[in-house]
Amino acid sequence: MDIEKLSNQNHWEDINTNAVNSSHKKKKGQGRFKLFTSSYLNQLLWGIILPKYIEKNPQHKVIEIGSAPGKNLIKWHTQFQHIPYGVEYTESGLRLNQELFVENNLNPENIIQADFFSESFLSQNKEKYDAVFSMGFIEHFDDPASVIKNHIELLKPGGTLFISIPNLKGIYHSVLKKVYPEILDIHNLNIMEFENFSAAFEKQSNLQKLFCGYLGTIDLNILQFKKYQFVGKFFRYLQMLLNFLCKILFGNRGFETKTFSPFLVYLGTKK
């Protein structure tokens, strides 16, 4: 399968290095203030959407595609009790993910260093998992529908697929075009249109849709800043205020729009 990657390995090595550096910075809890200003997006995703469709089961296996640094897998394991696995292409990502697993008393050998598109990986892991997910992966390729097909290959019949991508359109596109335009070049912006996102899953004849749509009212944290770090810091503080306002105004309902919602999300089951 000839799928063109829009990003290169150096980009992901840099991402993993930054993740290592940030992981050493200890953050002190701030009690009720932290509760009200924490991510509204995570409240909707991990508190409302995923629990509606994902079964808690310590016998189930889950794999994340592009798993470094591993925080999503840890969260999934904690919340749904599934045995976590990951596939990671880069050496730095592998080490980072394995270190996090060791810290959380999980088997580091469950992180596989492999090319997700290789025939050997796909054949060895075919229909092995009860849940397969990726967050911010398929939009780095020119043919997302084919990437989705590979996700499904790993699922057992009846298993659950969860895929999310950032919505770098709307206000986010306008900001990034000014402060970090090159980051847009390594993303497939076409798949970030709802019609195209939904159609990529509808092409999969062996999928049954559970949920497909925008998620999150607004989240400035998906913006990246290679320069203008002071702007990024300002946006992080602004997002804390927005989290608080969203929780007060919308509670667990959310208010999703094409212009402001930070993610597109799909959940489905394999027929």
Image: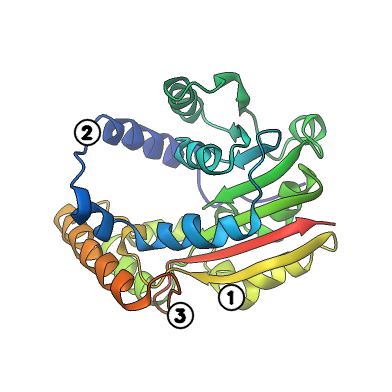
**Residue at 45% of width from left, 25% of height from top?**
104
Q: Residues within 10 Å of mark 2 (few under 14, many from 20)?
A: few
**Residue at 35% of width from left, 75% of height from top?**
171
x, y percent for residue 87: 61, 34
x, y percent for residue 172: 36, 70
Asked if residue 115 lies left or right of residue 75, the reply is right
The one of 142 and 85 positioned closer to us in this rendering: 85
Disc number for residue 26: 2
**Residue at 79% of width from left, 45% of height from top?**
153
First in residue order: circle 3 vs circle 2: 2
Q: Mark 1 points at which residue?
A: 194
Asked if residue 221 lies left or right of residue 201, the reply is left
Disc number for residue 144: none
Q: Is mark 3 on a helix, strand or loop?
A: loop
x, y percent for residue 259: 42, 79
Residue 2 shows in this picture: no
First in residue order: circle 1 vs circle 3: 1
Indicate the quadrant containing the C terminus: top left, top right, bottom left or bottom right: bottom right
x, y percent for residue 148: 70, 54
The one of 40 and 251 positioned closer to us in this rendering: 251
Q: Which amino acid does label 1 sit on?
A: Phe
Q: Which amino acid does label 3 sit on?
A: Thr
Question: What is the C-alpha distance between the residues marked 3 and 2?
Answer: 34 Å
Q: Which amino acid does label 2 sit on?
A: Lys
First in residue order: circle 2 vs circle 1: 2
Mark 1 vs mark 3, foreground winner is 3
Question: What is the C-alpha distance between the residues marked 2 and 1?
Answer: 38 Å
Asked if residue 202 lies left or right of residue 111, the reply is right
Q: Mark 3 points at which residue?
A: 257
The answer to which quarter of the image holds residue 108 is top right
Mark 2 vs mark 1, foreground winner is 2
